[in-house]
Amino acid sequence: MDKSQILDELRLQIGCVPDSASTLTDFYAGIVQVLTDPLDDLCAAIFLTSANAFHKIVSEGGVPFTDQVRFGESLLSVVAIRGKLQCFFTSQDQTIISPFYNGHHLIGQLVIVVQASRYKVTEEDLIFVREVSRFIENQHIKYETMF
């Protein structure tokens, strides 16, 4: 199966996550699980913002951030300031961080980390991650109005 087919399959699976998620946390967990299932070495997490920090709500694998990251202390803050998806590459890892919003208010960030030796991040992947972030934004609003 080529990358396009894999990403299309992931889109389909992510679109089905709300069908089995009764809470926002369940929804976030479902998104992370769908993203990490195809590749053993892929790690993913969702961080939400509070008054002074980012808080890890759900994660799979070894995401290189602690459970609570104070504003100004990591790449999460860099992405928050820039306000758009950012990629960070090292010789070992490729990290994609994509913010999601409610209007102009930052809700949180989707973090995906994959080993550079196992996978090559392309523009197609970045488009996919942006789509997932928009989906999270839309579903976040839906879950907020449910409760």
Image (cartoon, rainbow, N blue to C red):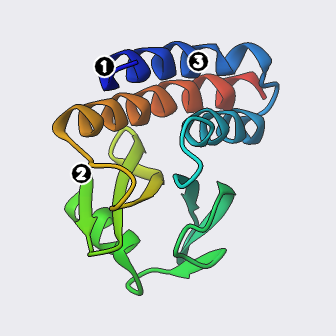
Q: Is residue 88 above or below residue 2?
A: below
From the top left corner, tell me how far across and down residue 21 is, in percent.
77, 25
Task: Tell me the kind of residue under disc 3.
Answer: Gln
| Nearer-the-camera pick, 124 or 38 | 38
Dot 1: element = helix
Determine the residue positioned at 52% across, 75% down: 64
Badge 1: how crowded within 10 Å, few (<14), some, or many (20+)?
few
Q: Quadrant of the N terminus?
A: top left
Instruction: Specify whether 57 is left or right of 94.
Output: right
The Cα atoms of the two marked residues, 2 and 3, are separated by 24 Å
Tag count: 3
- Frontmost residue, 59 versus 71: 59
Name the image quarter holding residue 147: top right
Residue that carries the numbered disc 2 in the rendered image:
84
Q: Which residue lies under the disc numbered 1?
A: 4
Between 12 and 58, which is closer to the camera in this rendering? Answer: 12
Q: Earlier in the sequence, mark 2 or mark 1?
A: 1
The CA distance from mark 3 to mark 1 is: 14 Å
